[in-house]
């Protein structure tokens, strides 16, 4: 996957992108802004590592956090939708997960939940089990998956 191609697709469609990141700590936004000219498409990035930050910056519900936990598709959905609401972007990706070390029997290391919000369309979510491959690898895999989600979404809408 080429981040430059992703940015070109967004620019051609007039789409601005926002990111809402927890376990990746801004790695998706950094990958996007590493490319010259990215300011034409990268609207903003939210790094919401704590539950308080998720609530204050993105409007994630305390009830959702309490019922499902921060690492859940429900929270990923609210993060992505909050990133759209609190920005001027038309496309937002969110990431929340357990990079490690650690985890629990209910939420193992390497579990990462993603949300993808597109203006005027239903938000989609998914959970990927990257496995206990170590913090650095989980974070890189999560970054790359989020970038692929953005690129695939933009490719699909370019073909319509």
Image (spheres, grey):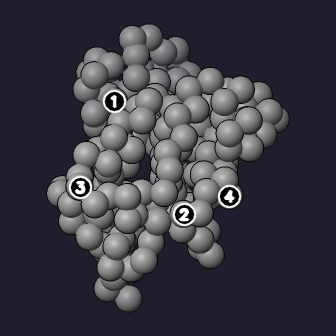
The CA distance from mark 3 to mark 1 is 23 Å
The crowding category of the residue bearing disc 3, from other C-alpha atoms within 10 Å (few below 14, some 14 to 19, many at least 20), is: few
- Left or right of residue 6: residue 70: right
Q: Which residue is mark 1?
A: 139
Q: Earlier in the sequence, mark 1 or mark 4?
A: 4
- In depth, the one of 38 and 24 nearer the eye is 38
Q: Which residue is mark 3?
A: 36
Q: Which residue is mark 2?
A: 89
The CA distance from mark 4 to mark 3 is 26 Å
The crowding category of the residue bearing disc 1, from other C-alpha atoms within 10 Å (few below 14, some 14 to 19, many at least 20), is: many
**In this rendering, which labeled residue sits more in front, label 3 or label 1?**
3
Q: Are marks 3 and 1 in contact (CB under 8 Å)?
A: no
The crowding category of the residue bearing disc 4, from other C-alpha atoms within 10 Å (few below 14, some 14 to 19, many at least 20), is: some
The CA distance from mark 2 to mark 3 is 19 Å
> Which quarter of the figure is the C terminus placed in?
bottom left
Q: Residue at x 56, y 26 (%)?
A: 49
Q: Earlier in the sequence, mark 2 or mark 1?
A: 2
Q: Residue at x 66, y 35 (%)?
A: 54
- Left or right of residue 40: residue 72: right
- In depth, the one of 75 and 59 nearer the eye is 59
The CA distance from mark 2 to mark 1 is 24 Å
Residue 37 spot, x, y in % from top left: 28, 60
Q: Earlier in the sequence, mark 2 or mark 3?
A: 3
Q: Which residue is mark 4?
A: 85
């Amino acid at each position: 996957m080429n981040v430059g191609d992703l940015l070109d697709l967004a620019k051609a469609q007039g789409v601005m992108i926002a990111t809402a990141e927890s376990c990746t700590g801004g790695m998706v936004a950094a990958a996007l802004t590493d490319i010259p000219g990215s300011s034409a498409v990268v609207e903003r990035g939210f790094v919401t590592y704590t539950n308080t930050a998720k609530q204050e910056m993105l409007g994630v519900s305390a009830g959702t956090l309490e019922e499902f936990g921060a690492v859940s598709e429900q929270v990923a959905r609210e993060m992505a939708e909050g990133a759209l609401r609190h920005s001027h972007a038309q496309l937002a990706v969110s990431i929340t997960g357990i990079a490690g070390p650690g985890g629990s029997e209910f939420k193992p290391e390497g579990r990462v939940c993603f949300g993808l919000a597109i203006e005027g369309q239903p938000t989609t979510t998914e959970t990927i089990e990257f496995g206990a491959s170590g913090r650095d690898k989980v974070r890189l895999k999560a970054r790359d998956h989020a970038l692929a989600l953005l690129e695939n979404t933009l490719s699909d809408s370019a073909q319509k």
